Every structure is written in C-alpha cells, then in structure tokens.
Amino acid sequence: MKSRVGVTLVIVLLYCLVGEDVTLSTDLYISYVRRWMITEEPARTVKPPLTLLWEKSPIWFESWNAGGLFESPSRRIVETKDGFVTVIRKTVNLLSKEDGRTLWTMDLQGGDIVDWKVVGTFMLYSSVNYRTKERTRAALDLIERKDKWVQKDTVPALYQPDMLIPTGDGLAVFVSNGDSKDVNDAIVAIDINSGQIKWKVSTDIEQRTLVPFTWFTHGSRLHVLVTQKAGGLYLKTWNTIDGKHVATNHIFGTDQLGNVVHPSVITSDGILFIGYNKRPRPARLSLIAYDTESNKLLWNTDVTPENRDDSMSVKHVMHAGNTKMMVATMWPNRVVVFDSEKGSILKDIRLSGYVGWTDYNSGLYSYPYLITGARRQLASGMAFDLIALNLETGKVDWTYEIETQNNKFTFPTADTLNFIVNSDRVYVGRADAKIMSFRHAGGSK
C-alpha cells in the first residue's frame, strides 16, 4: 500500500439528503451552494477550547443572498501572504489577518461571481451577467491589483455555471456542462499567466449522468465522477496537457444512482476516497478507496442504518495528513472514523445532544477532534453551534453558539463555509459575510 502523507485536495461536497430520491434542483442557487471546493491544510494540531478574538465583516449591513444567485458560497476565505481574500457583493476584499479590517477592495468584472480560486498571486474567477447573457473569465493580479487578462463571451439561455479547477501545470480549467452536447458543454483550459486558450473539448457527458460537483485534478489528469444507465459509479478522465479523453473506468457498484452526490477526497498519492450514496430509502452506503493511478478498487466497506427505513447519507469525507484515520459525517447526526488503508470502521458515533449537521457541514479535522457546525433543537426553534467533537470519546468537548432561530427548519445564515489554521489561530468564514478569529490551545503561544 502506498504511503499517504498529506492531502493535496479536498473536495468538500456539502449535500443534505432528506428522505426522497434526489435529483439536482433547477434552482441555480440551491445547486451551487453544495458544490464549492477548498484546499485542506497539512496536518496541524488544533485543540479546544477555542477563544474568540474578533468577529468582523467587510460590509456594514447584510441580507441573505444579497449579491446574486451565487453570493454566499463565494464568501469563503483564502489565505495569502498579505491577508485573507474573500468575495462579497461582486467585490474582492483583502482582509487583515490580525484584526479582520479591510486592507483594500476591488470590483470584479461581469455579474454574479459563480466560482473563484487563488493560485499564487492570481485570483481566477468566472462571472455571468444574466441580463446581458455575457460570461466573464478573468485572472486578477492580487499584487498589482489589476486584471492580468479578461475573456468575455455570450452564454446560451440554458447556461450552466462554470466550475473552476486550477491544475499543477499552470492551467485554469473552466468546466460548464449543459443539458446537451450542443448547449454550453465545454472544458476550456486557459494558461494562467498569459490568458491563452490551450485547448477546448466537449465534456461528452449527459447532465443527468454527471455526479454533481466532483471535478478534480491529480497530476496531469482531470477527473469527474459519472454514472451510466446500466448502473454503478465511474471515473471519467482527461489529459490536462491536450484535453484528450483517456478513459472511463468503473469504480464500484451496479446501483441506479441518478445524480445523487458522492462526497470524496483525493490524497497526494492518487487515492480517491468516496462516500457512496445509494438512494436514501432503503439506505445503502459504502466507504470506498480507489487508486486513480492504477484504476483499481482497493476496498469497500458497507455502512448500514440502525433501522432499515431510516434516511441516511454520507455528507462529508475528510482526511488529515500524517494519520491513517479518516472521518465521514453522515446525515442526520452520525460520524464514522475508519482506517484509510483497510477500510475497517474504528469508531461509530451518534452526535449526542444535536439533531443534525448544519447545511454546509464544513469541517476541520485535527485528530482526535472534528470541529464543525451542528443543529441543537430548542423548545421553540433551533440553535446553531460550532462544536469540537472528540472522536476518541464520542463527546463534544467545546461549543460556541453562533445563532438561534425561531423556525426549527431554517438553516443558519451564519453557516460555516470554511476553516483556516495559522499558528495558534483558527479562522472561520461564514455565509453571512462575517469572519471569526479564534485562538486555540494547540498552537504556539
């Protein structure tokens, strides 16, 4: 078995299955909020308690989804040498790491920002103006504070928003997958430095067979999870050098999956770990390890609900470097710790005192702690907490109440989008545009 030290890319696929057969929503906002990606930090020690140092927002007033269909997920934060980058109301903000104050802002081109990534000193982004039917793809130089290059084109009426995947060989890959091969269906690779289009190919994937939000790169390969009419989960692969299709390989199963989400994480040695979700009732879940380099299934482990009729789904799969123990969170309030080499289940925990995860379920995994958001039912409403779950004892060792709401079915506007660890600080990016800075017990003083 290969060594797995460190994780280069985590695909955080934040999905909530609620008991019916699942298909993609036609509401672009609902679809999008479950699909952004973050890069996981190397293994670091983060221990509770966490002490709040400050909580700030680059904007002085707020309303839900104020900046367009894609606003809230773009509010995640990314660390650079000079500060934190975030996108709010179609504006890029650079924020101080020390106190969260705004260092500078710059308006971005186009309309709603549908995806963005920071690569080196460049911020890559894609936006769309639905009124003029114009799409903008651009690279912003964060040092010079000006666009390095900008490309604009017209989008069709059946436009599907871009997904942006930077590669290790200097390309920005923009993927848009429409409802047919003739409508908004393309993979475009653009040189990050020059803005030159290197290649453009069709995805050659029907929308109903595409597993949502599962595009990722490893080495010189671009991958996505797909299904087929005959059943089962497959991995479709292209060469990032020239865009040529390499293969479509069967990974696991024969189930008719539709376009149910399967959260996954790819490690630096090319092992893809997947939370395999069959349709919710009767639930059949599997944890899978697949070698993308040899195209071999390494192991699969079934996870069953306590009762046959229970609704259950894998929401999030996480791996921290320098440990073979992985974590899968499952809807509504279950956590499984498993061995990444053998697939054996080491711990199976029910989240005591909480009725479920929050909508995004972003998590920070620093063994033995899983730091994430959870929903706590009140007599008349719901509370939304940050928690530190001890995976060894199964107990919640630390909580911080972020928000309460009167409607118990309402998801929090303050939902956690992502975490960043820097020395003895943990920074939290939230959907309501606020950023929180905590000091934790495991860092340097």
Image (spheres, rainbow, N blue to C red):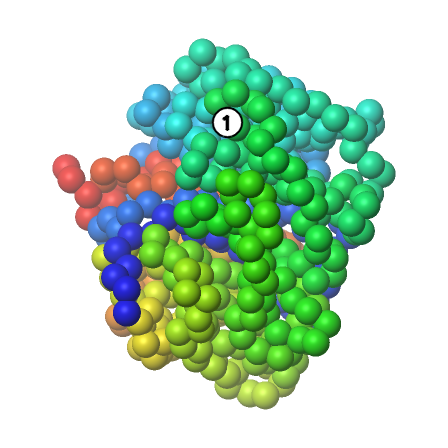
Q: Residue at horizontal 57%, vertical 60%? A: 247
Q: Residue at horizontal 66%, vertical 30%? A: 127
In the rendered view, would you say 154 is above or below 347? above
Screen quadrant of the N terminus: bottom left
Residue pointed to by mark 1 = 192
Comparing 255 with 318, the one in front is 255
**Badge 1 density bin: few <14, some 14–19, many ≥20, Cα 10 Å:** many
Residue 118 visible in the current orientation: yes
Q: Quadrant of residue 395?
A: bottom left
Q: Residue at horizontal 31%, vertical 41%? A: 421
Q: Of helix, strand and loop, which one carries label 1? A: loop
Screen quadrant of the C terminus: top left
Q: Is residue 40 left or right of residue 125?
A: left
Q: Position of residue 68 (x, y in %)?
A: 70, 33
Q: Is residue 20 left or right of residue 11?
A: right
Q: Position of residue 132 (x, y in %)?
A: 82, 25
Q: Position of residue 115 (x, y in %)?
A: 59, 36
Task: Residue lying at the far right in this picture: please name it.
Answer: 157
In the rendered view, would you say 345 is above or below 354? below
Task: Residue lying at the far bottom in this picture: please name it.
Answer: 308
Number of numbered discs: 1
Task: Residue lying at the far left in this picture: please name it.
Answer: 445
Q: Label 1 is placed on what type of residue?
A: Ile
Q: Residue at horizontal 63%, vertical 62%? A: 226
Q: Is residue 380 left or right of residue 178?
A: left
Residue 272 visible in the current orientation: no
Q: Position of residue 264 (x, y in %)?
A: 48, 60
Q: Quadrant of residue 369?
A: bottom left
